[in-house]
Image (tube, coloured by chain):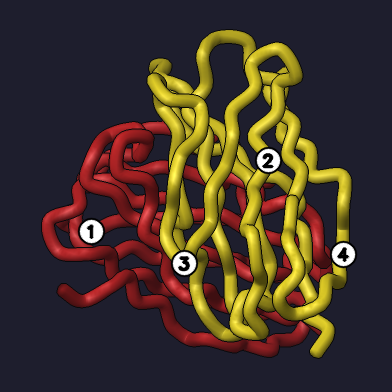
Chain colours: A yellow, B red
Amino acid sequence: AQSVTQPDIHITVSEGASLELRCNYSYGATPYLFWYVQSPGQGLQLLLKYFSGDTLVQGIKGFEAEFKRSQSSFNLRKPSVHWSDAAEYFCAVGRYSSASKIIFGSGTRLSIRP
Amino acid sequence: EAGVTQFPSHSVIEKGQTVTLRCDPISGHDNLYWYRRVMGKEIKFLLHFVKESKQDESGMPNNRFLAERTGGTYSTLKVQPAELEDSGVYFCASSQDREGLYYGYTFGSGTRLTVV
């Protein structure tokens, strides 16, 4: 069965510190991978996506993610977090099929320590 | 470009009542999706419209849920009668491409439904 696992429910980091949010997927064929962010009171916003090619992808707001096929992972990183990065982050995966849809993980809530 | 609009933003209803959620996708987006998040769990797929046709409704929980998309524009999701376990945040999203994989989805802010 297809699945997305985000093992960390809640992470707290200090402002200016580096960040890595973990995501593992189980999807068989080559997946399409996404990271979305939801700030309080907002809808989900697409941070970045991976289809093929360079396994390190850059997104908005200074985020990047690295696709590692051997580990079935697509971890999200940021070198230095800002207080405005406090939000909930969702990893998602999809693939082309007759009934394509994107499957989401359960999310990681990020808090920023001043 | 206007985004995806959902209303109401919040709804509190009693068990057994009916509630209708509405979603206005981005103009020109043929693909419209409904998702639901219950109590901090994963965001789960409910169904997918291509224009006015239901492409995939495999995620609809049961026949108390009815989704429509008249004329391929806005969509409604009706819950009748509502049960306590229907509480959660209902998200609508639209996309330019059929699978939503190339461009990703654009989400609305969601409707928080509380059934008491």
- C-alpha distance separating marks 1 and 4: 40 Å
- Of circles 4 and 3, the one toward us is 3
Identified at 48% across, 44% down, the residue is B47
- Of circles 1 and 2, the one toward us is 2
**SS label for mark 1:** helix
In the rendered image, which residue does mark 3 sit on? A61
Label 1 close to label 4 by CB (< 8 Å): no
Q: Amino acid at mark 2?
A: Asn
Chain for mark 3? A
Q: Give the x, y percent position of residue B41.
A: 80, 56
Chain for mark 4? A
Q: Amino acid at mark 4?
A: His
Chain for mark 2? A
**SS label for mark 3:** helix
Q: Amino acid at mark 1?
A: Thr
* Number of the label disc, if any, that sits on residue A10: 4
Quick one: label 2 or label 3, which is nearer the N terminus? 3
**SS label for mark 2:** strand
Label 3 close to label 1 by CB (< 8 Å): no
Q: Give the x, y percent position of residue A44.
A: 51, 65
Specify whether disc 4 shares its chain with disc 2. Answer: yes
Quick one: label 4 or label 3, which is nearer the N terminus? 4
In the rendered image, which residue does mark 2 sit on? A75
